[in-house]
Each structure stands twice: as C-alpha cells, then as structure tokens.
Image (spheres, rainbow, N blue to C red):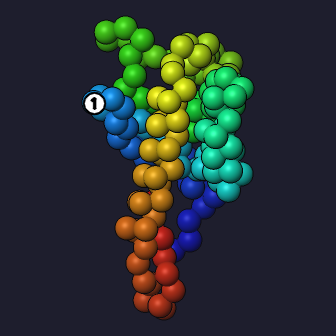
Amino acid sequence: MPISLKKLQSMTDTAEIFFHGEVAEVVYRVGAITAESFDDITAAIEAAGDDGHSEVDLLIAKIVESWDVESEPGKMLPIVDGDGAPAPELAALPIPFKSVVLTAIMEHSAEKNEKSGRRSRRGSLRRAR
C-alpha cells in the first residue's frame, strides 16, 4: 500500500531527552527531517559555540512540535512565536541543551527506522514509521 507525501510530512514522533539528570519528552515532526535538515542540524550543532543560537533555534522551531520544557512551573516554554518564527525565549536555553535536543531527535529517528525495517512479501526492505 503506498504512503502519501502529505502523510509523511504530517507524521510526528516522541523522543526522550536526558540532560544533567533531567528527563523531558520532545514531540518532533518526522517529515521535517530531510537530508538537508540533517546536514543543517549537524552543521548548526558544530557551529553553535561560534555563532550563538540563531541557526539552532531555527532548526528547533522547524522540527520540534512540542516539549516538556517549562519556562516556569506549569507553563511550557514556547518554541515558536505567533508568526511561526523561533520564540525569543529559545535564546535563554543553553546551547548544550539545544544540542542534546537535536541530537536525541536524530538518534531516535535513526533507531526507529533501524528497528522498523522489515521484509515485504515481495522481499524488498520496507521501513515503517
């Protein structure tokens, strides 16, 4: 049965992140992880210490749909503003935390694809969510 591009682009998944003894869940857009964004994530993480938060914040805004990160008790830290741009509050997050978020998403996505590979009746390798 074929899968539509629209369905691929609308899929989400959840990864756990671990940062200095704390755990949070991150819901990410599976369809936003393309070869281009994968390269962008790698480059942004490597350059984050040099040029600040801007590239990493753009990637988080593009890929992360929601998360368990609070700005204060009971209030989730926004990811995007009303116009869909990275929320200014993202600049307050430490770069190592942002790197952990993006790395965890990429690792979760890769692990999920490795585990879900299976053979179809015709013998071709099929990958699921």
Residue that lies at the very extreme toward the bottom in this rendered image: 122
Q: Quadrant of residue 43?
A: top right
Q: Amino acid at mark 1?
A: Gly
Nearer-the-camera pick, 103 or 36: 103
Residue 6 shows up from this direction: yes
Graded by Cα atoms within 10 Å as few (under 14), some (14 to 19) or many (20 or more), the crowding at tag 1 reads few
Residue picked out by circle 1: 21
Q: Total label count?
A: 1
Q: Quadrant of residue 35?
A: bottom right
The location of residue 74, given as percent across then percent down, is 32, 11
Horizontally, residue 6 falls left or right of residue 70, namely right
Residue beneath the point at 50% across and 30% down: 96
Horizontally, residue 58 falls left or right of residue 17, namely right
Residue 1 lies, with reference to residue 106, above or below; the image says below
Residue that lies at the very extreme toward the front in this rendered image: 50
Q: Quadrant of residue 24?
A: top left
The location of residue 44, given as percent across then percent down, is 66, 38
Residue beneath the point at 61% across and 13% down: 88
The location of residue 49, given as percent across then percent down, is 63, 29
Horizontally, residue 21 falls left or right of residue 88, namely left
Quadrant of the image containing the C terminus: bottom left
Q: Secondary structure at mark 1?
A: loop
Residue 37 shows up from this direction: no
The location of residue 10, given as percent across then percent down, is 55, 47
